[in-house]
Amino acid sequence: MSEIGLILALGCALISGVALLCKHRGAVNAPDVAMRNPLRSAGALFRSRWWAIGFGLAFCAWCLHVAALSIAPLSLVQAVIAGGLALLAIPARRWFGIAVCKRDVIGLVLCASGLTFLAVTAGHGHPGHGFASTSMLAFEGGTLAFGGLLMAASAHDRLRSRGWVRLAVAAGVLLGVSDVALKGLSGIVPHSPLSVISPWTGVAILGGIGAFRALARGLQLGEAVAVIVAFSAAATLSAIAGGIIVFGDPLGSDPLTVISRSSAFLAVVAAAALLPMVPGAAQMPSSAQRA
């Protein structure tokens, strides 16, 4: 079953990359996302054709993601999805006219390599569904608070110059919160359908809404590839951490594996450091491309 989960995760990776590029094109053509007016901002985004297309593709990718989570370990699914980052430069250049420099490519490859190594060394045991409520509550509560703090910091006057970085990371962290909650629900809902009325359902929805708002604003402020890599890396690392802390996914069976996987985590962080720290004007679509 894990092999089927890997195939579903790979399909999710391919579709979600294109979806994010579509969302970027739609976001830069929409009015600024206002955190205090979420419904109005969401309506403005969906009036952009490219955002709507990206959202539709993202929904298809999400369905594949949930299916993969139900039959494969969380850390393995997330690592395979993030490994698809290496393919992002191709559609970005050819289909969306986004200039991808050598530094972007190095960052993409380094990030994808680190996350793919995590996938290869994750093992192929039975997917873990069981969890302790206390560990789930501690992880989800702490991660939600961290994501909220990043969103608040992005709006602070002294920190606004790199607000897109904080928004991209916040979006990824909050998506990780949603993924961990969905993984927990996937293990209990099939046996007890009424358990869908659960606090973890609310947490999954809250994390998804927060990720939606933070990512939309981050895409408006930052350079496309940089935002997508920061978002994807944060989502993957938070979900992998949740898999280890909440569901007991193994970090490694021996000291060498533990050290190697920890080095892979650091490679992802190094990849993020290679990303541009200011938005690139060259990334903006031409008037002919505007929705």
Image: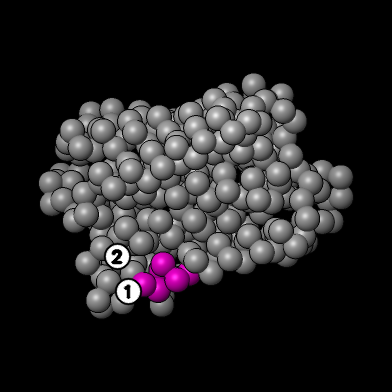
Q: Which mark is residue 188?
A: none
Asked if the stretch drawn in magenta spans residue 149, the answer is yes
Could you say which is closer to the camera, residue 40 or residue 249?
249
Q: How crowded is mark 1: few (under 14 residues within 10 Å), some or many (20 or more)?
A: some
For the question of whether residue 150 can be seen, the reply is yes
Q: Mark 1 points at which residue?
A: 155
Residue located at (33% from left, 69% from top) = 154
Q: First in sequence: mark 1 or mark 2?
A: 1
Out of 168 and 62, give the one closest to the viewer: 168
Which amino acid type is marked by label 2? Answer: Gly
Residue 89 at what x, y percent from top left? 28, 32
Q: What stretch is highlighted in magenta?
A: 148-153
The number of callouts visible is 2
Could you tell me residue 101's position as x and y percent?
17, 36
For residue 163, which numbered disc appears in the image? 2
- In three-dimensional space, the C-alpha distance between marks 1 and 2, rounded to whole angstroms, equals 7 Å
| Residues marked 1 and 2 touching at CB (< 8 Å) | yes
